[in-house]
Amino acid sequence: MRWFMRHVMVLLYSALIVGTFSEGHLWAGDHEPTGAAIDWDHYGYLLPSQSTEHLKVWWCEAGWKVGRSRPVPTAGSEVVTLSAAGNDWEAIQIVLTPSEELRLLSVRCEGFRGPAEAEIPASNVRFYWVYYHWVENPTDKTGKKAWWPDALPHFDKPIVCRAQENQPIWMVVYVPVGARPGGYCTTVTIETDRGKVEIPVELRVWGFSLPERNHLETAFGFDPGLAFRYHRVATDADRRALLDLYWQAFAEHRISPFNPAPLDPIRVQFFPDADPPRADVDFSAWQREMTRVMERFRFTNFVIPVQGMGGGTFHARYDPEIRGFGENTPQYQAMFSSYVGQLEAFLARQGWLKMAYVYWFDEPEPKDYEFVTKGMERLKKYAPGLQRMLTEEPNEKLLAPVDIWCPITPNYDHEIAEKRRRQGERFWWYICTGPRAPYCTLFIDHPGTELQVWLWQTWQRSIAGILVWQTNYWTSPTAFPDSLQNPYEDPMSYVSGYSTPVGVKRHWGNGDGRFLYPPLSAVCGQTTGEAPVLEPPVSSIRFEMLREGIEDYEMLYLLRQLLEGRRPRLTPEKIRHYESLLEVPAEITRSMTSFTLDPRVILKRRAEVAAAIEELWGTD
């Protein structure tokens, strides 16, 4: 997904993200800047009982990006606290600040104990160490040349904590479906070569669970070939095992890939000389694999590829063609009709028709509108049940029959969208190398809350789905034609294609298209002859915060469902109260370019929504 050339003027406009406090909270878009997010130091809680003269231990909410050299907080806390629903992941950061260099050997806990001997096992608690990336070229004026945290590698060996530098530990807890509500507690033990620290942690479990499959639709790109290269896998068995490790990461973050079955495509043969010309479609391998992954990983959506459509982007396109026959020939029309009719019928039989979408052209310009309209009309004529998605906003000059409009976030017009919704059309939206400040973005060198706020903006505007062009864009074949980029050492995403000369490094932005990382052991994947790396991918702070936002969206969806089901039994006062909680408050986001950067604001509202769900849940 390349929002690059046609929006270059917007990209050049890098208005500054925030800068000040408003009633104790940091805001985007309202005031003059007071420095990059990496420099903020007004948050966090010192754990005095666990701190010594030689080692300060403190914690903070997950939404902060902890500067490597920011000072230890002065506000105190004797315990780490967090709250979650069932089927919910919740994270916090524990930070070590040593006065002298030390080695962090291990982090562990024995699980949480709750009411009536309820337990959340230790296997549901994960610890990662926060990796700092040197940003040499800030994405925009919101960023800064500095060390920025993002990747979250697994603890597989001791790590060095440098003197007078912060080393955050990312702690994430998964609360199982149906967990008994109430207070839980555990002790996190951190071992170093200077001794150990024991940190009390309290977890509040709410009395409800989030759904297994999202109501929010998601569509994120993934390049399996690139993953295979970095992990050095060559056999079919290893490739499939590796894909499952990535799909597990997608599923745990409530994200659906464009193509969940890349090794088992739908196979089609075209017969132009038959009477009439036809297509024979073989779904067998694809059906087996899709049935497995959709049931196991609970994905919400997937691309259904359509051969012969033609396609392209605003930059270049290619014409429709099947076996040498163009779209205006009777042979093409007959084969295409036979082919897409079988696709539609098969998806309907499987119950997948509303999960599938056709994504065949990307970001058209006005010069492409006639071409896109003809393609969409052809799909509608021969397979009207196939959902047609287009990464563009509706406009008067584009008359294409589109089921799902997916504009870049600044181009979304709510008034126009509401009119289109009344006609049965739906809306997703996306972010990529744009927009930049002052909008919510996906960049490493931006505040940590932006992706979470993006999902509150998504709910606020009745957007049904989100899309991101790529999740593992670790290298650019244009910028690195003879090697593989190390995404840990170089966080910049470089332009590929779009007439960029080979060897030229043009910037798309730090972290664009990169939510997951290969394991540290796989970053030298250009070396041949080494053993395959069958290890899970490494998550990122941005991927974690995206999940937080999706979970918030699902909580709001659940509250709305419960309210509608129980409305006849509620008083008008209660109805107004619950309806008010379905509105996104100005404290979280006032507009697309004015929103909180303080995770505590979101957590407060989230707790209020959770309390309302618990009340309604108990009215049966």
Image: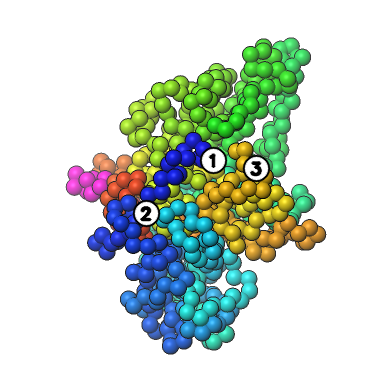
Describe the element under mark 1 as helix, strand or loop.
loop
Q: Residue 510 location, x and y as percent?
A: 52, 54
Name the residue: 66% across, 28% down. Answer: 307
The 10 Å Cα crowd at callout 3, few under 14, some 14 to 19, many 20 or more, is few
Q: Residue 26 location, x and y as percent?
A: 32, 60
Select label 3 or label 1 by which is in front. 3
Q: Which of 341 and 410 is in front in this view?
A: 410
Which disc number belongs to residue 2? Answer: 1
* Residue where numbered disc 2 is placed: 17
* Residue where numbered disc 3 is placed: 501
- Residue 178 figure quarter: bottom left
Q: Residue 447 location, x and y as percent?
A: 42, 58
Note whether residue 31 is visible. yes
Describe the element under mark 2 as helix, strand or loop.
loop
Note whether residue 174 is visible. no
Up/down of 378 relative to 233, above or below: above
Q: What segment is highlighted magenta in the picture? A: 572-580
Up/down of 83 relative to 424, above or below: below
Name the residue: 37% across, 39% down. Answer: 462
Is tag 3's residue or tag 2's residue first in the polypeptide sequence? 2
